[in-house]
Image (cartoon, rainbow, N blue to C red):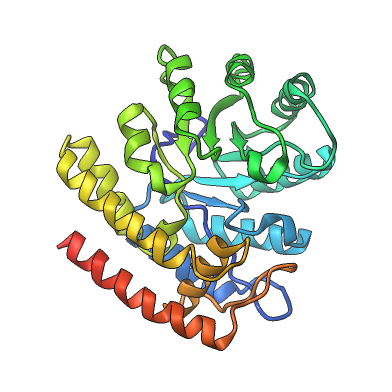
Amino acid sequence: MTQSTVFKGIIPPMITPLKADFSLDISHTEILIEHLIEGGVHGIFILGTTGEFAGLSSIVKRDLIRITCQRVKGRVPILVGVTDCSFKESLDLAAIAHSFGANAVVAAPPFYMNIGQEELINYYQKLADFVELPLFLYDMPSHVKINIEVETAVTLSKHSNIIGIKDSSGKIENFQALCAAFRQQPEFKIFVGPEEILAETLKIGGDGGVTGGANLFPELYVALYEAFQKKEYDTVNKFQETILFLSNKLYQHGTYQSSYLKGLKAAMSVEGFCEENFALPLFPHSLSEKSILSSKLLQVKERVKQSLN
């Protein structure tokens, strides 16, 4: 795959399987990669929010990039998150991604300094100048304190190495504005993060979803995308309702601020795709919490099975 790689469809933000000592769980990582590819995904995104990038050591990040690229072997595009407060650390991570054969890098804004759109434009232009892989913008205002405004994305799209954006604002009006702004630039790819609005964003003109639940049930999300391509909108709506059911059952379990990631990774551990180890400051559910979530997961599995049959 080269810079002309087509980015589209369902690209799961892969969880990072960890051992109890916070090192990379290589065997589960390989099992998970095969699960995703067998599920028909159109790419894999590592070191994103769902991958707990901010809590991982540089060693784990390098190991994950290496193992993922070696295991995938070009079967699907690999996108690597390089978000960091340090510009140099982002460049170093991008260089590692390039050396192992990844296809693109993804960067959210630096998340500590107070900055405005002017600094953001300068930052991304400099990043795009130096990285050797094509760059996706990553709008994640809930985590980094600043929104990549639509006008800023338009300005940045003029850089030949900035090829798209992942919109995790969760605001459908923001996604609509992006699609309207880039209607004449179909080569600039627009992906949604929150899976709760996946179907709606595809109908608006989005190119696909970077959807966490596709870690668990990749075939469900791929089926929705493929149904949309066939204009089978009743089927699309049926799959979207199942995704909302999953979100309600698994991502809102408990009262934690981190309930999405806690619920997803706990469910993944029940299914044998990882151990329930998190990078601090996150920590696993209690046994009773996990027991309740396991019963919810059974309901979700049955609903997914019914949807796909």
Image x and y of residue 7, in percent: 43, 36
In this view of the protein, can residue 4 be seen by the observer? no
Image x and y of residue 198, in percent: 37, 42
Name the residue rendered at 57%, 56% in the picture: 50
How many numbered marks have been drawn onto this rendered protein structure?
0
Name the residue rendered at 47%, 57% in the picture: 72
In the image, 181 versus 86, the foreground residue is 181
Say above or below: 17 vs 157. below
Name the residue rendered at 56%, 79% in the picture: 275
Quadrant of residue 220 within the rendered picture: bottom left
Name the residue rendered at 27%, 53% in the picture: 241
Quadrant of residue 243 within the rendered picture: bottom left
In this view of the protein, can residue 183 be seen by the observer? yes
Is 154 left or right of 177, judged from the image as shown? right
In the image, 292 versus 42, the foreground residue is 292
Image x and y of residue 143, in percent: 68, 46
